[in-house]
Amino acid sequence: MYQIKESNRELVTQHYLGTTYEKWPMYYLKISQPTNKAKKIIWMDCGIHAIEWISPAFCHWFVKEILQNYRTDPKISSLLQNLDLYILPVFNIDGYIYSWTTARLWRKSRSSHMNGTCFGTDLNRNFNSSWGGVGTSHNCSSSTFCGPEAESEPETKAVARLIESRKSDILCFLTIHSFGQLLLSPYGYTKEPASNHQELVDVAQKAATVLKGKHGTNFTVGPASSVLYQNSGSSRDWAHMIGIPFSYTLELRDRGAHAFFLPADQIQPTCEETTMAVITIIEYVNQKYFPNGAKLTSGNLCLNLLLSVLFVGALS
Amino acid sequence: MELEPSHYPAQRAAGVARACISYRRGECTDIRDIPGTGHKYHLEFTLKDTVQEVSFNCTAEVLYHLGSQHSAPEVHFTVEGELGKNPDDADNKFYSRIKSLKEPLVAQNIPDSFGIVPPEMEPIRHLAFSACDYIIWQNSTENTWYNLAQIQDVRQVKRNDDYLEFDYTVLLHDFVSQEIIPWQMQVLWHPQHGVKVTQNSRQPK
């Protein structure tokens, strides 16, 4: 992260979020075109579940894509006029390290419970969105242990604190997982539709279609509680509940043939197709909140003034 | 086995049928509640042998029994075409190779963390898939979706007869609960006689 920030100083800054249970510092990258404009925010996090190795790989790829192409790709440069990208490459640092050094199939964080006899909270059950309800476990040895209380984990607190403080500027919250090839909208904790359910599904469908165009990969779209399973305490649900209009979980390749052990030759194609899907979602958000022509440049202003002078002249 | 998210309960039932017959994708046509007995799923699907590159049409009925005591789901199926195959070259080569090993085969972590399986371990992995099918079938409920995630450990047990025997510790993944469940299984194999799980037990996490 340091190297990326150093070699792209005009665009990238590194920001402290907090520390993990094992005291690793958590940083997110802010990709922001310097202007005087007040911009809105797109948030994306990877690696909340340690076992899902393709996820952090995707965040790294995505950052690389943006930084390599923002000067030459009109799509990307136009997005960056109005939007800042906040990227957290590894949410669950402790768990991710543990999956590399000790237990490949570890999913949770590495917090200690029950006097050191039980480890880890499922960070995606630890958010304050119907916490502790359906689809979670209150048993600390379970893979979906929701923690002793909502936001009990330092990692959850660190992210929630930032999102909460900037929520009026965050338009889109994306959280990257595997596997399943799914684009999930809220909610997981209930079958009740989100207030903007249809729009969420339409945009996701658009993204899935674009994704499929790249390598033919099929993604299924819909609310988590119908497409996947009911679960409470997810970050995606929480983000939408505090008012972030676009909130999605992406479950990347595959559908179970390799499951968590995605072969190395699928990393790049997965990252390429997912990048296209994410850009599609961000483009929609950009168009919706910054429609073409609404932006007043100095050129437009002169033309407007000229026209109004002519009209006044004509009327008098 | 792959997910087809349009109908997850049907997929889980199909997973059970697969574990019983071995398949790749399923489509539910009917779920029936049989009062006092359980839930019956009627399925039509395609079985794909990825090694031989052949497909078979199948129908199956999977009955999950109600009751406090777990019993294996009942599976009745029909398959268009011949499923069973004669041992092929690869099977015989594998058999000869293992039989002639001086030291019993021992291996861990198949696939490794990066998804890599050494070519000589592929048959060990195929054998584990087959043996796990039995365990998955026997232990499935309407709310589980088991798949073999990784072979944690495999040790050959030398025998005096014609069979090969392996003691496996595998890690099963349940997609519904996201649990990783260690399972020990004793597996016999012979090119002509096929796979048999002689003993198996769930292990503590």
Image (tube, helix red, strand yellow):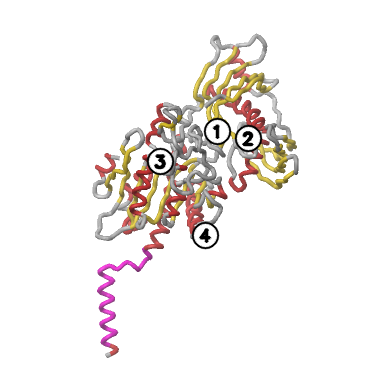
- The circle on residue B53 is 2
- Residue nearest the observer in this picture, B123 or A285: A285
Read off the magenta span: A290-313
Quadrant of res B33: top right
Do the residues indicated by labels 4 and 2 lie within the same chain of the protein? no
For the residues labelled 3 and 4, the Cα–Cα distance comes to 33 Å
Query: Which chain's residue wears label 2?
Result: B
* Chief SS of the magenta region: helix
Labels 1 and 2: the sequence-earlier one: 2
Position of residue B109 in the picture relative to residue B158 (left or right): left
Do the residues indicated by labels 3 and 4 lie within the same chain of the protein? yes
- Residue nearest the observer in this picture, A43 or A238: A238
- The circle on residue A134 is none
Q: Looking at the picture, which amino acid does disc 4 mark?
A: Gln
Q: Which residue is mark 1?
A: B173
Foreground mark, 2 or 3, reads 3
Foreground mark, 4 or 2, reads 4
Within 10 Å of disc 3 (Cα), the crowding (few <14, some 14-19, many 20+) is some
- Above or below, B137 against A66 in this view is above
Do the residues indicated by labels 1 and 2 lie within the same chain of the protein? yes
